[in-house]
Image (spheres, rainbow, N blue to C red):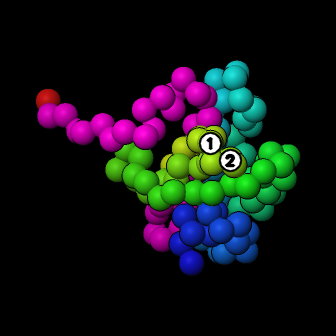
């Protein structure tokens, strides 16, 4: 099972299976939404943090696969409303980095695709 499907379906064991032991989770709420104050390091700690955050949210999370800066990601919705964008860094078929942007000011164009520009 891949990380996108595992997270979107709430399959925590499936997610643990694709996380590298040294995975790093970083989040950004911009002071407007709750976020981790420091990077969370290690598969068990990341999974625990994410599970606790989902439980605190008290709603239904869904994930829509997307691409973020050329990497796999998810647009995460809480009860149908965009909560944030989760980008994955994948190395050797394992997720080594998770980056969760929750800052509403950074999510204003999530529903639109920005074409790449040439220099």
Q: Gap between marks 2 and 1, in whole Å?
A: 5 Å
Mark 2 Cα shell of 10 Å, populated few (<14), some (14-19), many (≥20): some
Q: Is residue 55 magenta?
A: no
Instruction: Kindly identify the residue that appears in the image at 48 percent across and 71 percent down.
Output: 93
Q: Is residue 92 magenta?
A: yes
Q: Residue 105: where, in percent of width, then height?
A: 54, 23
Q: Quadrant of residue 85?
A: top right
Instruction: Kindly identify the residue that appears in the image at 69 percent across and 40 percent down.
Output: 39
| Residue lying farthest to the front in this orientation | 80
Q: Is residue 116 above or below residue 93?
A: above
Figure disc tally? 2
Q: Residue 87: where, in percent of width, then height?
A: 51, 49
Residue 97 in view in this figure: no
Contact flag, marks 2 and 1 (Cβ < 8 Å): yes
Split into 4 quadrants, where in the image is the C terminus?
top left
| Residue lying farthest to the bottom in this orientation | 1
Mark 1 Cα shell of 10 Å, populated few (<14), some (14-19), many (≥20): few
The disc placed on residue 24 is none
Instruction: Kindly identify the residue that appears in the image at 69 percent across and 23 percent down.
Output: 32
- Please, what secondary structure does the residue beneath circle 1 have? strand
Residue 92 in view in this figure: yes
Q: Quadrant of residue 20?
A: bottom right
- Of 78 and 92, nearer the camera is 78
Q: Magenta stretch?
A: 89-118
- Is 107 positioned to the left or the right of 83 in the image? left
- Is 101 positioned to the left or the right of 39 in the image? left
| Residue lying farthest to the left in this orientation | 119
The disc placed on residue 78 is 2
Residue at which label 1 appears: 81
Q: Residue 108: where, in percent of width, then height?
A: 48, 29
Q: Quadrant of residue 6?
A: bottom right
- Is 61 positioned to the left or the right of 1 in the image? right
């Amino acid at each position: 099972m891949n990380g996108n499907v595992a997270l979107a379906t709430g399959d925590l064991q499936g997610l643990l299976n694709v996380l590298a032991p040294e995975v790093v989770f970083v989040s950004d709420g911009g002071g407007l939404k709750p976020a981790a104050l420091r990077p969370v390091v290690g598969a068990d700690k990341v999974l625990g943090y994410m599970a606790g955050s989902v439980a605190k949210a008290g709603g239904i999370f869904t994930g829509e696969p997307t691409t973020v800066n050329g990497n796999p990601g998810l647009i995460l919705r809480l009860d149908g409303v965009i909560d944030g964008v989760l980008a994955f860094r994948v190395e050797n078929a394992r997720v080594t980095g998770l980056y969760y942007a929750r800052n509403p000011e950074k999510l204003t164009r999530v529903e639109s695709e920005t074409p790449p520009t040439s220099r």
